[in-house]
Image (cartoon, rainbow, N blue to C red):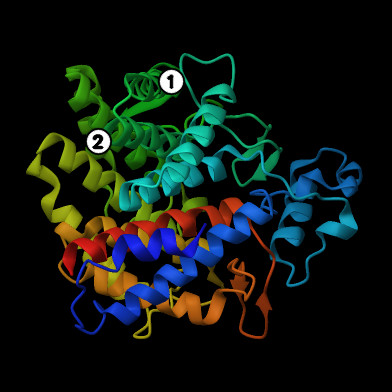
Amino acid sequence: MNKLVLSNSISDQGLADRGLCSDAVYERIEKSLIALEKWLRVNQYAGYDPFDGLTSHLRLLTFRKCLLERILEQIVLRSPINLRPLLGIKKRSDIAFARGHLARGYLRLWNLTGEGLFRDKAVEFLCWLRDHAESGYSGHCWGAPFDHAARGGQVPRGTPYLPETSQIGNVFVDAYEILGEQAYLETAVSVCRFIINDLPREQIDGGFCISYHPGGQLFIHNANALGAGLLARVGKIIHCQEMMDLARQAMSYTCNYQLPSGAWYYGQEDRYHWIDNFHTAYVLDGLKCYMDSTGDGSFWKELDRGINFYCTTFFLSDGRPKYYHERLFPIDIQCIAQAIDTLAYLDNHQQRSVDLAVKVAIWAIDHMQDKSGYFYYRKLPYKTVKIPMVRWGQAPMLSALVNLLIKLKTRC
């Protein structure tokens, strides 16, 4: 990215010197974004992933037993030292979830600057995503290019996940709205066909929960909310009442299980009873998307309580994000990226959310960004883990920082 491309695009906006909404703050975030985008290009959008442990040659020693696979995966994920080069784990650029964030980031850069090179990069990633959807399903959907061992069991590579598929579906809607090409909307409609036809959903308590993946019913709130949000958004555009009705039933399920504090457990089964930062943000994203798309005000109270819990629980006064609601560490780049993006998205509902997003961004730039441009994976109480994760860090940070700049440009 040529620095002048961004700088010339914003220098005449007349940003007022108003604390968090100032020229200096804007320029710091802009400089960080320029460095990050350059790092991504230089490294050809490749990096590691927290959950890539089963691509190690040591997997042979697990005998394909789920417990042993989980142990291997978690050792690689949690190690403060990057074991991957020693274990034969390679950097990769073929993770659809990363490319979805990159497509959204470049779409936003095109929207912010009008520079054709950003549009071209967005189109490149969107074309890749369309061409690399998983086969054998009713519509477009995406999974990870490696196996995963989860609490719910073994998940083969290529198994489509609802949260990431819904997020990519929303990127195609963004592309339709920003670039005006009908083919992008058709892909988003195809994603909705996958959600409706291929994912189990169980009726319960006046609503239903859309499962996390096609392998069986899982009651996971962030996945259900993100799926409902996409169904509502696409349903509104194409005037599909079936999608709107399904979205309302799914959102009713998740809102019925909101805790008195305003939080949601990750999932309803006892083994999923934890509350963390970025999955809470996903629920808020899905709920707000549903409400914005439908005009249905039935869940205003749940959204208000959820935003209040999120903003008052997960952040320290200097902007540091907590991973779980009851403890700070690890300070994780995924929590940072999603917090910036979600808080910017909540701007028209929560007046101070962008100010908090700025605090998170500035703290991350000061404490988590390498001189070369990429953001570190995690901070532990005793060590900073500097592994360059792309799907988990660089790609969502690119998209989030551009979103924040757009919001600051609008406000200031």
Please state which of the two labelled residues, at mark 2 or mark 1, is closer to the viewer.
Answer: 1
Residue 194: image tag: 1
In x, y percent, where is residue 82?
Answer: 78, 66
Using the image as rendered, state which of residue 337 and residue 1 is in the foreground.
1
Mark 1 is surrounded, within 10 Å at the Cα level, by few (under 14), some (14 to 19) or many (20 or more) other residues, namely many
Up the image or down, 395 lies above or below 404; here it is above
Which residue is painted at 27% across and 55% down in the image? Answer: 345
Up the image or down, 357 lies above or below 58; here it is below
In x, y percent, where is residue 33?
Answer: 47, 64
Residue 383 appears anywhere in the view: yes
How far separated are the C-alphas under marks 2 and 1? 24 Å
Residue 46: image tag: none
Residue 401 appears anywhere in the view: no
Which residue is painted at 46% across and 35% down in the image? Answer: 162
How many labels were placed on the picture? 2
Using the image as rendered, state which of residue 17 and residue 165 is in the foreground.
17
User: Which badge, 2 or 1, comes first in the chain's sequence?
Assistant: 1
Q: Which residue is denoted by mark 2 in the rendering? A: 205
Q: Secondary structure at mark 1?
A: helix
- Amino acid type, mark 1: Phe
Mark 2 is surrounded, within 10 Å at the Cα level, by few (under 14), some (14 to 19) or many (20 or more) other residues, namely few
Which residue is painted at 41% across and 68% down in the image? Answer: 30
Up the image or down, 409 lies above or below 207; here it is below
In x, y percent, where is residue 131?
Answer: 57, 22
- Amino acid type, mark 2: Asp
Q: Are marks 2 and 1 in contact (CB under 8 Å)?
A: no
Q: Secondary structure at mark 2?
A: loop
- Side of 341 relative to 35 (left or right): left
